[in-house]
Amino acid sequence: MDPVVATLGILALAVVAFISNRIPLGVVAIGVSLALYFTGVLTLPESLAGFGDPTVIFIASLFIVSDSLDSTGVTAWAGQKVIAHAGRRRTLLLIVVCLLVAVLTALISVNGAVAALLPLVVVVAARAGIASSQLLLPLAFAAHAGSMLALTGTPVNIIVSDLAAENGGRAFGFFEFGLVGIPLVVGTVLTMLVLGKTLLPHRSATTMPPDLRLLASALRSQYGVTADTGSLLGAGRGITEVVVPPRSALIGLHVFAGMTTPSGDLVILGARRGEDHLDGADVTLRAGDALLLQGAWEDLARHTIGRDVLAVDSTEDLRRGVPLGRGWVRAVVILAVMVVLLATGAVPAAVAALIAAAALVVTRTVSVAQAYRSVSWTTVVLIAGMIPLSTAFTTTGTADIVADWLLGFVGGFGPHIALLTICLLTILLGQMVSNTATVLIMAPIAVSVAVSLGTSVQPFMMALAVAGAASFLTPVATPANLMVMEPGDYRFGDYWKLGLPLAALFLLVATWLVPLIWPF
């Protein structure tokens, strides 16, 4: 089979699979790599090269760094401090939420920042008497804008920076993205202030994530605990509620308030049976009884998994709600060192991120198991599997053919029109396919167009990153969009109403502002 035909056919099948949403993203990406091998487009090492690519290693390491900030309570502290000063006014809350998630996204990732702030924003919206749908979609959309503030904001930034350096240009500086990122964040916030109240629905979440202080206060009352809330929760110690399931080894155990558990690590603060807390000095546990336990967070996590008890709320989730928990200083210092290494270019980006991830594990800021869990393996596999398709576009000449076809239509109108066409295609494709996969597909075409026109590759790569971040029109465009769908009670059609003017803003920045800063 002709390599060009095979490459385009594999691309078409991948797009259909992505749009159908019936096949897991990772399976599609692996299928792309295997298809390139079996059709003879690439050799086996070339088909699997994405799994050892420095970009993939860098992104995987960033997930660990991101999780360390969340698990040590840094994000909870920052969110609570900033939002606490915003009061109950919708305008001020919207500005604070958008700016907070934008800055946080620049340091960790779009998905990490939205996931970290989502529970907090839902609680804040409820306390302020504002429909959660008025704040959650702005949370996701502002995160996309914030991803353009720094190199670490999104995998796409890393990809275009590497491609620029590999194709006659240079790598972008760590904060160089901020030259377009700051106008995008400002424009996004202004758009949502002007149009958000009208274009966003007014619906509230059916369920709310637990507010740790309120939860602790409620548990004190329900279990008859006299200790104050502050003494129950802290950086090192916490509480959790568990239920005794059928066939538990604890059934028949005699317990009383103040005793330690059989392991000696936890203290039983109280017990409940049905709606009543058990005040007796000696209670014999039955299936269905609930216990309130206190101890070190590590002990709570270790002893609330398994067959003997069922945790009502995940201990790990509860611990993340404690501002500035154990290890937060180490997490912040390691993050700062990584940012300095990335900003100065002292070591390659992948090396800087690996050093940070390893330091977090060695200093026990995150455990080995936590480090593995924190990595979004779907994202890693998706990028690793799609990189070979980008390689195939270049090596088979497919990118040149598509670029020639594109130039046949718009080449006579100059590089601005060519750039506009590429960005439009990127934005449209990015609403149905992962923006990372979209940029990997479009990047070789953009490089070929730049070479054919005899222009610099820099504006094409930066514009591609901006267009790739314009994932506003559908909930399936990015995981962040999907995260806010259920808690905000959004419908599929809610996204494009506010997303369309934002997409137009990003297109304007990509095709007008970018060439002014990085000339053709």
Image (cartoon, grey):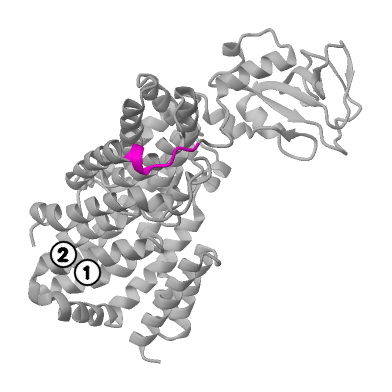
Residue located beneath label 1 in the image:
446
Residue located beneath label 2 in the image:
457
User: How busy is the neighbourhood of tag 1: few (under 14 within 10 Å), some, or many (20 plus)?
Assistant: many
Of 465 and 370, the residue lying toward us: 465
- In the rendered image, is residue 476 in sight? yes
Mark 1 touching mark 2, by CB under 8 A? Answer: yes
Image coords of residue 153 (percent x, y)? 32, 46
Question: What element does badge 2 sit on?
Answer: loop
Q: How many marks?
A: 2
- Asked if residue 30 lies left or right of residue 471, the reply is right
* Residue 210 occupies quadrant: top right
Give the residue drawn at x 37%, y 53%: 496
Image vertical order of residue 26 relative to residue 11, above or below = above
| Amino acid carrying mark 2 in the image | Val
* Residue 106 occupies quadrant: top left
User: Mark 1 or 2 closer to N-term?
Assistant: 1
Q: CA distance from mark 1 to mark 2?
A: 8 Å
| Amino acid carrying mark 1 in the image | Ala
Q: Quadrant of the N terminus?
A: bottom left
